[in-house]
Image (cartoon, rainbow, N blue to C red):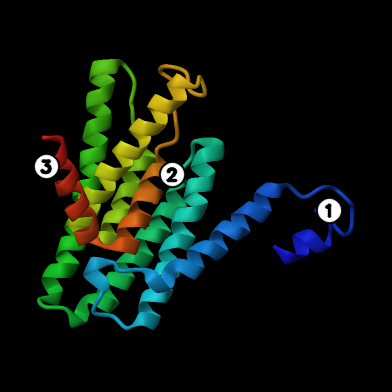
Amino acid sequence: MISWWILKRKCLNCGVKISYKYFLTELTCAVLFAITTFAQPTNHLANSPLILIVMSCLFFSILLPLTLLDIQHLWLPESICRIGAAIGFFVVLITLTNTYPPNWMIFEHSLSAIFGFIFFRSLSKFSKFVLGKEALGRGDAKLIALVAIWLGFVGLCLSTYLAFVFAGFYAILGLIFKRVEFGEYIPFGPFISLSASLVWLFGNEFWLSRIFFLSNYIY
């Protein structure tokens, strides 16, 4: 980030302007790393603060490039999703061995990933049957499976719920202000990543209490 300012937003060798997107990406990454000290992922609270910070940095480092690629290209690379899922499984395998019962926690996270992938693919097939086109891509299903491995079943449900809420608000506002056309594809990966990050940062109980409060307030 500092070099971007020092070089006056130009390449030192050829003088071509460097896009502000690189600066914003590095700034976003720095902010995410800075707030890792406040992360409270429910299923990982038994770990030491240092381990939580390392885990958080890994998780955000995976979600950030997926978010940017989906925004720019409507593309969630399978390679990154697989690497992220593999790292998540390794993290769960190593860090949850101190929980009770550890085998069940590992099984839950793994089963949640399978469930999340099947649910999203089924929802996509159903939307194609009803609307004539898939509302969710295969990459979205792989991303939600990645999230499930890191967060477990409750985290998966909360991330899915929040992602659809955020996407719904975005679509409504986009239609109102004519930034989105009806029937236009919008990247869903960023909403999954945002929701998963919020669940990781604040924990399951935080979001469950607010969802229940909102539900009771409405009804």
Residue drawn where x is 28% and y is 67% of the image = 41
Number of residues whose C-alpha sits closer than 10 Å to that of mark 3, classed few (under 14), some (14–19) or many (20 or more): few
Disc 3 on helix, strand or loop? helix
* Circle 1 residue: 10
Point out the tag, 2 or 3, that comes first from the N-terminus.
Answer: 2
Of 97 and 198, the residue lying toward us: 198
How many angstroms separate mark 2 from mark 1 (CA)?
A: 29 Å
Q: Is 118 placed left or right of 26 in the picture?
A: left
Number of residues whose C-alpha sits closer than 10 Å to that of mark 1, classed few (under 14), some (14–19) or many (20 or more): some
Of 154 and 88, the residue lying toward us: 154
Q: Please state which amino acid type lies under the numbered disc 3.
A: Asn
Residues marked 1 and 3 touching at CB (< 8 Å): no
The quadrant of the image that shows the N terminus is: bottom right
* Residue 124 place in picture, x, y as percent: 28, 30
Q: Which mark is residue 190?
A: 2
Comparing labels 2 and 3, the label whose residue is closer to the camera: 3
Point out the tag, 2 or 1, that comes first from the N-terminus.
Answer: 1
Disc 2 on helix, strand or loop? helix
* Circle 3 residue: 216
* Residue 166 place in picture, x, y as percent: 35, 39
Number of residues whose C-alpha sits closer than 10 Å to that of mark 2, classed few (under 14), some (14–19) or many (20 or more): many
How many angstroms separate mark 2 from mark 3 (CA)?
A: 29 Å
Q: Please state which amino acid type lies under the numbered disc 1.
A: Lys
The quadrant of the image that shows the C terminus is: top left
